[in-house]
Image (tube, helix red, strand yellow):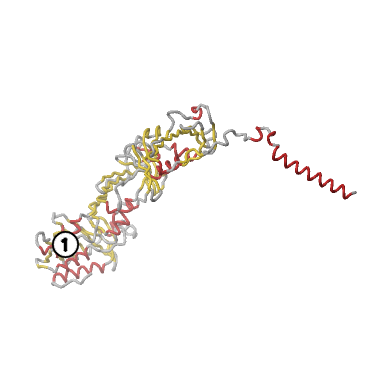
Amino acid sequence: MKKRIGIILAAVAVTLCLAGAVFMLYGQDDTPESVLKPSDPYKDISLVISDIKESDVEEIEAKNFPGAPDFAVTVLYDEDEETFSCEMQNNPEDYYYSDTYMDLMVATLLDMEATSVAANGEVNAEDYGITEDSITYVIRMKDGSEKTLRLGKVTPLDSGYYVKMDESDVIYIIGKYEGSTLERDAYEMRSIVIYPTMESYMDLYRMRIEYADGSVVDSRQLSDDEIARGSSYALFKFTEPIVIEINDDMAKGNYYEPALNLSVDQIVADNKDNLAQYGLDTPDTILFTNVSGSETKLILGDLVEGNVNYRYGTMEDVNCIFTVRGPFDFMASDIYDLVDTTIWIHSIDDMKTIDITDGTTSYSLYIDSFTDTEEASNSRFYAEMDKKALDTLSVRRMYMELVSLPTVGSLEDAGLDAETIRKGKPAYKIDFVYDDDSEHYIYLYAINDMQLAADVDGNMLFYTSRSQVLKIMSYFEMLKNGEIIPEI
């Protein structure tokens, strides 16, 4: 009996399970629609606002864009590399647009997804800040079709922006980042290029720094003719505060390359109405450069919040104020701390005599350059001492010793007082007299048995060593006696 009851209960259970299954399959028609459908009436609308292939786009025009009411971006697509780039049209005058910003803006526009849908159908778009005056992007396709997106206002919780395509009734909400990218002021997207034509520091023709105290550092690149005439050991020539030619590698590393690597960090004012606020009314330094024939005047003011690597700046032909990223060490007024450990004197081709004395004995080297003879192309110059012809290679080697006195820095860095040293009797004096009778001199003062301090045209340096000068003196003796100076 119990067994039969168990069988019956089991059969009832199976029957109920089958009935439940049938209900699940066929009983949904009786379920209310409000339960079956989502409560958000826009949930089934795609959140993809635009999904456009970059290769299909020809041009994007931005209208009502802050700072640039009407400009366009031409999208250039490289089929082989599968990359795109942007060329700006109708730029605000005097500004170079940043490729990074342009690429970001276009990429955001062409591949845009919403975070949600704000409205669909017959709604008042003006309630969402979408009007004819809104920032508008017109995307023109290569097949002649167009798509237009208008940017609305920020959402109430400041978490996104409203946008709408003209071809759709849907008003979407996009993220704050995407919206701010599309809303970005044109001037915020500027990339002020200090040296737009520079490819390398070799493009530099001239660089001049003027300081607030009136001092000047001026230099230029040697011409091909100057290099051909014997200045092959130097590339740049300082013309102020003294005339020196400097070694290429050191000039690049210490002076020219840092100067040409200055860059604009960010724009802080769209006009020059308040130069005094940034120390630009009486600038600390003004940097004049000529790169590939393009003249640039960079005015530098105060440090940015005391940071030695950032200064406020502006340019003569740019109507804004920006911050400039350093380093600015190259602008030290003490040139000798910036150039090579050797000082290169004016080219020998421009010299008439080189005189050296130790206070007792004096030597003079007379230089007479060939101009129209075949021999000049081989010897480059002719020299005589005490009116006696000298060996050309020996004179060249002597000259190289004279202009290659090694230095280790300024006297101040060595803890030495220049005025105290000047009170002493010079151990040696070397005069360089040029064809125009101008003079360049070096006084050498004894510091100790091994080192000499040098006064170069009134600017004190710290020279080493005495043995180098004694070698030069012995070379003068060799020249006077007609001996050949060994190769350096």
Q: Nearer the viewer, residue 208 or 455?
A: 208
Q: Amino acid at mark 1?
A: Ile
| Residue found at the very far right of the displayed protein | 1
Figure quadrant of residue 448: bottom left
**Considering only vertical position in the picture, is 255 above or below 296?**
below
Residue 9, horizontal then vertical, whole percent? 83, 46
Q: Nearer the viewer, residue 257 or 49?
A: 49
The residue singled out by tag 1 in the image is 354
Question: On the rendered structure, is 208 left or right of 67?
Answer: left
- Residue 303 in sight: no
Q: Secondary structure at mark 1?
A: strand
Figure quadrant of residue 26: top right
Question: On the rendered structure, is 55 left or right of 229?
Answer: right
Figure quadrant of residue 352: bottom left
Estimate how packed mark 1 is, as few (under 14), some (14 to 19) or many (20 or more) residues with alpha carbons within 10 Å.
Answer: many
- Residue 65 in sight: yes
At x 36%, y 47%, the residue is 263
